[in-house]
Image (cartoon, rainbow, N blue to C red):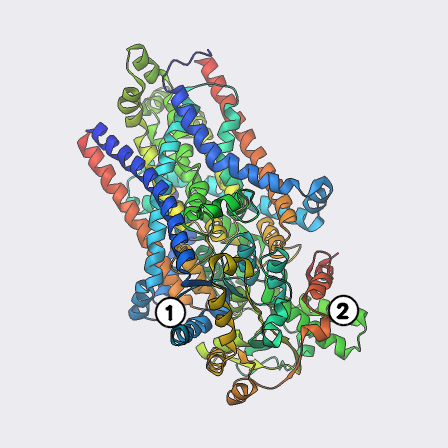
Amino acid sequence: MREPKSIRRLLIFLAAAFLFLMLILPLILVAVEALSKGWSVYIQALTEPYAIKALGLTIEATVLAVALNTIFGIASAWLLTKFDFRGKNLLGSLIDLPFAISPVVAGLFFIMLFGRMSPIYSTLQDFHVAIVFAVPGVILATVFVTFPFITRELIPVMESQGRSEEEAATTMGADGWTIFRKVTLPNIKWGLSYGIILCTARAMGEFGAVSVVSGHIRGRTNTLPLHIEILYNEYNFTAAFAVASILVILAIVVLILRNIVEARGVKAQ
Amino acid sequence: MLSKRLKKIFGAALGAVLAMGMMTGCGGQEQAATSDGAKEILNVSYDPTRELFAAYNEKFKPHWKDTTGEDITINQSHGGSGKQARSVVEGLEADVVTLALAYDVDEIQNAGLIKSGWLERFPDNSAPYTSTIVFLVRKGNPKGIHDWDDLIRDDVSIITPNPKTSGGARWNYLAAWEYARQKYNGDEQQVRAFIKKLFSNVAVLDSGARGSTTSFVQRGQGDVLIAWENEALLSLKDAPDDYEIVTPSLSILAEPSVAVVDEVVDRKGTRRIAEEYIRYLYSDEAQNVAAQNFYRPRNSEVLAKYSDVFKPLTLVTIDEAFGGWTKAQQEHFADGGTFDQIYQK
Amino acid sequence: MSDKKIIPGYHLTLGITMFFVSLFLFIPLAAFLLYSAGMGLEKFLQAATDYRNVHAYLLSFGCAFAAAVINCVFGLILAWVLVRYDFKGKRIMDAMIDLPFALPTAIAGIALTTLYAENGWVGQFFYAIGIPSAFSPMGITIALIFVGIPFVARSVQPVLKELDPQLEEAAQLFGADNLTIFRRVILPELVSPLMTGFALAFSRGIGEYGSVVFIAGNMPFETEIAPLMIMTKLEQFDYQSAAAIAIVMMVLSLAILLSIHSWQSHKLRSIGAIN
């Protein structure tokens, strides 16, 4: 299908204009605000020990959430596209549930499960295990809000792929692992990498749910987004945007990494 | 080639899961270490006190070292006052709470974490520093705003946070209410009409004090910001050429409350430190720190030293005017209270 | 369709999936529902159907719907342009799409409010022609468009990429024009990912709090969103009313997601029948 040049131009223009208004301008604004008091203030905001600790926790929570969700995403997408079974639709919708739940409420879930009003709280206390208002709670909340991402990215691709190739491989006697590696993975790897990127980005930026379970202890349970909120609430506008710009830069690094991996993959093929 | 990469990915993922398990364990151990050593306390506070407590902690640590020879770590947590109180109720292990209003501490008491009678445990209603509600207007006061009366004029646009979501904003509301009550000699009908008119002039009802300040300062919304004095002074410090503070004829004495969280300190064995941490807030040294961070010190001698910053005005307390927080909360801010009635159709 | 599972891995993937779903969804959800069950039906109905809350649901659903529709249109255009055309800056454009996720919602909210307020870079033009682009339902929609940008584009993109070009070529040989090819050959393939993207953007929009609260203005009966009502209740330590509102929103969103899923699998099945 070849459409006329004018339509091409129009579509590209529309896409660019949309992105510019909705996305690039806000990012420019972040940069402008971050640097509004000069580089030294910017650097100072980033090298503050609490900012560095918050960055560390954000990376930790992101890596773990993405790893867990990758395992879950592949398994659940395989389950939902390769097999028919009772309750499949319900399961598919349940996986999306975290999207339907306001992140703030998601945080409350974990509070009610592990917090002081929970029946298991005293047992946790006896074993000196802290889950909410400690690092594990932050990680749990992050996994929760990014739960559907990879599954959701894989399902349409695997669906349009159909089952015939895998079925043929099975009849030829290949085991499941081999089928996944040799047949499925090459088809889904872009979908998978998109999913991982989305998951990473969302995990880094998650605010609402984490804010409920973290307790906001400086240098302990503050992630970068929480650190930004605190700076903002302290009337420290410039520093808040400076730290926010770091998240944007981190996201860009992740995106570049993906591009490199992609380019290598193409070359290898 | 692909399978090699895949194995790596899976290896990494598995490793990560194991690491998570281990970390959960470590988190527990860390907690255990602090409860044995008891050399660490957590002060759960609200948003605009960070600089105050950052400065105060630097004074308290050497003080504690001088009296006991122990080194201690003080952790800080800041957020909206109500949300912070909720976190403590939900299990955030605060040794002391330093919040915006007594109502929030009462809620922690209701959950059984703080013993009743906390308000009398320390001097001055357990409020070592105070503030009040003032107006921040644009430089030169172009709308000529001098008192609460001016806020109900048709040409005045107001910025204030929502008292339902912001504990601090409840003081704003009550200050206006008390002014109207005195003006109309307690005629409830007229007081309600006054408040209704005032809120019909509100342009943006932000969820928190910080959001309101941003709407007023950064977005140029509204002619007047109803704010805590310490926050107004802070805005003024940042941009002395753009704003000025108008002190109304009457306002409310905002008493941010402090308390020791009994259940936590008894379990962690930190009661001694926590109590001294609050007691020392009343010392001359700490009172100076409070004044430097724009909170009105309780100590009248220290207050006199900063009389150019803190203008004198008639202040009513919540106990005198509203019979305490529990009653005020019930009448005005609970669902169906006077604030909700403003918007009822 | 047979009940036999030809492809291996059914039990393994079912096991992993159920393990995660239980650990991260069921158990926390059960804890929440158990806690909320204490309120009783009367209290639940009272909190859930309060007039002000109903207004907030309608506003949240309306704005989320509008934002999701707009994202569907522009998401499709974005995906199309990125998959099919070559132009300068394409790679950058491609990479940019995911950024809304990485930016903490609060910062996005503050940045968008600054831009679309009366004295903002963009807002001044809207206000000049009498459209309030901040502190209004439009402001809420703008924030929700921002948080939803990646969903549709990222759902459509991979499918568009995997699309078999031979189908289009064949259609062209038979003399079909562009519009017909798009409508009859390409669009049917894209309906499923479009619906997925729409559902995700929509449900994300309903629950979004951080970015919206800054730009909404939060005036009762005008710009109060449902998540704000939850926060309001929590601020009064009224966990039960908060839970009631949360449950209403959850059930409504789940119903929407569920109907989209059954519609999708119904469509798949009918395609399967043709084949």
Task: Looking at the image, tell me whether mark 1 or mark 2 is earlier in sequence order.
Answer: 1
Whether residue C67 is visible, yes or no, is no
> Would you call the spot at circle 2 few (<14 residues within 10 Å), some (14-19), or many (20 or more)?
few
Q: Is residue A235 above or below residue C16?
A: below
Quarter where residue B307 is shown: bottom right
- The picture places residue B301, in percent across and down from the top left corner, at 54, 88
**Nearer mark to the viewer, of 1 and 2:** 1
Residue B160 on image: x %, y %? 60, 68
Secondary structure at badge 2 equals helix
**Does C181 sit left or right of A260 as displayed?**
right
Q: Quadrant of residue B108?
A: bottom right
Circle 1 residue: B70
Per the model, the C-alpha gap separating discs 1 and 2 is: 58 Å
Residue assigned mark 2: B193
- Whether residue B247 appears in this view of the structure is yes
Q: Disc 2 marks which amino acid?
A: Ala
- At numbered mark 1, what does the secondary structure look like: helix, strand or loop? loop
Image x and y of residue B321, in percent: 72, 74
**Disc 1 marks which amino acid?**
Glu
